[in-house]
Amino acid sequence: MSGVNPQPRDHQPHTVYIVSPLSRLPELVRTLVPDLNVLSYPIPEDFRIDPSEYSKLAKLIDESKADIIITFHSTLRNLVQRGLSCDHLRWFQSCSAGIDQLFRAFQKPPEHMVFTRMGEGFGELMAEYVLGQIISREHYFPQMAEYQRQKVWSRSKFIQKRSLSTMTIGILGTGAIGSKIAAACKAFGMTVRGLCRTKKRLPNFDVLLRNEDLSKFLTGCDYVCSILPSTAETKGMLSGDVLKACQDKRSVFMNVGRGDVIDEASIVRALNNRWIGGAILDAIDREPLPADSPLWTHPDVVITPHVSGPPSTDTIARVFVSNYQKFIRGEPLEYMVDWKLGYQRVVPCICICIDRYM
């Protein structure tokens, strides 16, 4: 398994290659780490890069003999597919929390490299997104906006409201981001359930259940929020008839994790069978969502383009600098990817990069 910290080359300068749409990131890293050789290659914000450009970039990175690369996991996969050798690379720092495409880049991880993911910078914004969507729904903000457009003054539809303190949210995934969401929901008085792989005790969760108790976990939730990564264990975890367990309260399903936890057809089926009362989807199994998808026009669906937790450039730089100091001292990095689990290790380790959440 990859993950053994590479031994830094004593007293030799390190070179980082930053492949990112963030124009400010390379200069900020140069300012914060003056002894680091920083090379950069700007890419479009929409990540539309011609295959021939990937081949050119792969050659540039190889020729630079950079030992650190900062980019998205999807970009690294494309670079590897276009000939990036990785011979000189010792550390890959992902620009996103998800790393599923990283596993498609390599049949097995190079033993000389350490892989890390974005481990902070998402939690607070994602917690705000989750709470914002709940409050928006419970206070009828979208309907009020429509009434305003139609110049309708009517209060009868909006008088019956539920306080968050009367509701239960179930959070699938109890890591750093899940814990931030739990704390925010608890601050508003919600009852918080958590679903996790192993038995544990965590603050801000009233109930913690293991994956094998999924049906019990779903029953009785007003909101079900998935922040699960994409792994062999989580793919399709909620597909089929699983959400039928939500029918007593007609839970609202929210996905801010990875889209492949449930397929599109299963969401539509759960909505049409009234197993769930709505779906708030920041992550979907097909991204970008095709124009012919029924989810676009379903009255009980809210769709956002995978933007619930974009990290800031400043956060990226701060995390990178902190972990670079560990890298040059040969210490364990934070948020290291565990290739067996399919996401980061339980013991923190590192990561980084960019101003846009993939």
Image (spheres, rainbow, N blue to C red):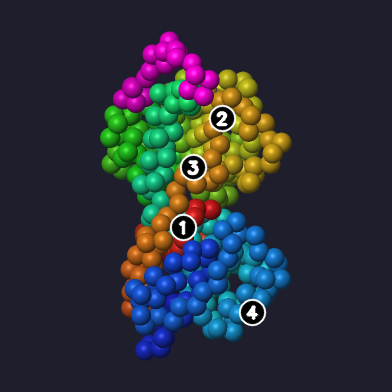
User: Which sits earlier in the primary sequence, circle 1 or circle 2?
Assistant: 2
Question: Could you tell me how far apart the alpha carbons at marks 2 and 3 are, in whole angstroms?
Answer: 14 Å
Q: Residue beneath label 2, please?
A: 301
Front-most of residues 25 and 191: 25
Query: Which secondary structure lies at badge 4?
Result: helix
Amino acid marked by disc 2: Val
Name the residue at 50% across, 46% down. 307
Q: Residue at x 67, y 71 (%)?
A: 53
Amino acid type indicated by mark 4: Lys
Q: Position of residue 94 (x, y in %)?
A: 49, 63
State the CA–CA distance, disc 1 to disc 3.
17 Å
Task: Give how far apart the Cα atoms at labels 1 and 4 are.
Answer: 26 Å
> Alpha-carbon neighbours of circle 1 within 10 Å: few (<14), some, or many (≥20)?
many
C-alpha separation, residue under disc 3 versus residue under disc 4: 36 Å
Report which residue position mark 4 lands on.
Answer: 59
The quadrant in which residue 313 appears is bottom left
5 lies left or right of 44: left
Q: Secondary structure at mark 2?
A: strand
Tell me where residue 235 appears, x and y as whole percent.
Answer: 59, 45
Q: What residue does disc 3 label? A: 256
Q: Residue at x 31, y 40 (%)?
A: 183
Residues packed near mark 2 inside 10 Å, few (<14), some (14 to 19) or many (20 plus): many
Residue 83 in the image, given as x and y percentages of width and height? 67, 74
What is the magenta range?
A: 148-167
Picture disc at residue 355: 1
The answer to whether one can see residue 340 in this image is no
